[in-house]
Image (spheres, rainbow, N blue to C red):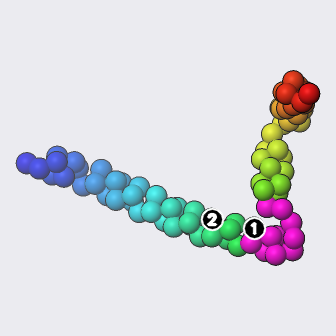
Amino acid sequence: MDSAESMGQATREKLKQTIARVERLEAEKAELAADIREVFAEAKSFGFDTKTIRKVLSLRKLEAHERAEQEAMLDLYMGAIDD
């Protein structure tokens, strides 16, 4: 008996559905990534600095106190190396 035969029909069907769902989501993710690249290219064409936009997006994901902690640490470190 091979491994596929050791699974019940319902289990095999659930596995196929799971794989198909992940494949659809991966395709959607690739489409979204392409859309995001397009938005960044458009922003760049307007003269916006895309590196800064990415940083702003990153900071906006943080809670206010986490952002304040990061900024304080950055100030501390920059102060330590600036002579």
Q: Circle 2 — which element?
A: helix
Residue at (41%, 63%) from the top-left corner?
Answer: 20
Q: Earlier in the sequence, mark 1 or mark 2?
A: 2
The amino acid marked with disc number 1 is: Phe
Stretch in magenta? 41-50
Residue annotated with mark 1: 40
Secondary structure mainly formed by the magenta segment: helix
Residue occupying the point 22% across, 48% down = 7
From the viewer's perspective, tell me whether residue 72 is left or right of residue 32. right
What amino acid type should be assigned to the residue bearing mark 2? Ala
Residue 46 percent across, percent down from the top left: 87, 74
Residue 70 in which image quadrant: top right
Residue 33 disc label: 2
Give the label on residue 32, or none: none
Question: Which one is nearer the viewer's eye here, 24 or 64?
Answer: 64
Question: Looking at the image, which is closer to me, 24 or 42?
Answer: 42
Residue furthest left in the image: 1
Can you give x and y, in whole percent of width and height, for residue 66 in the image?
A: 83, 32
Could you tell me residue 83's position as x and y percent?
Answer: 92, 27
Asked if 46 appears above or below 61 in the picture, the reply is below
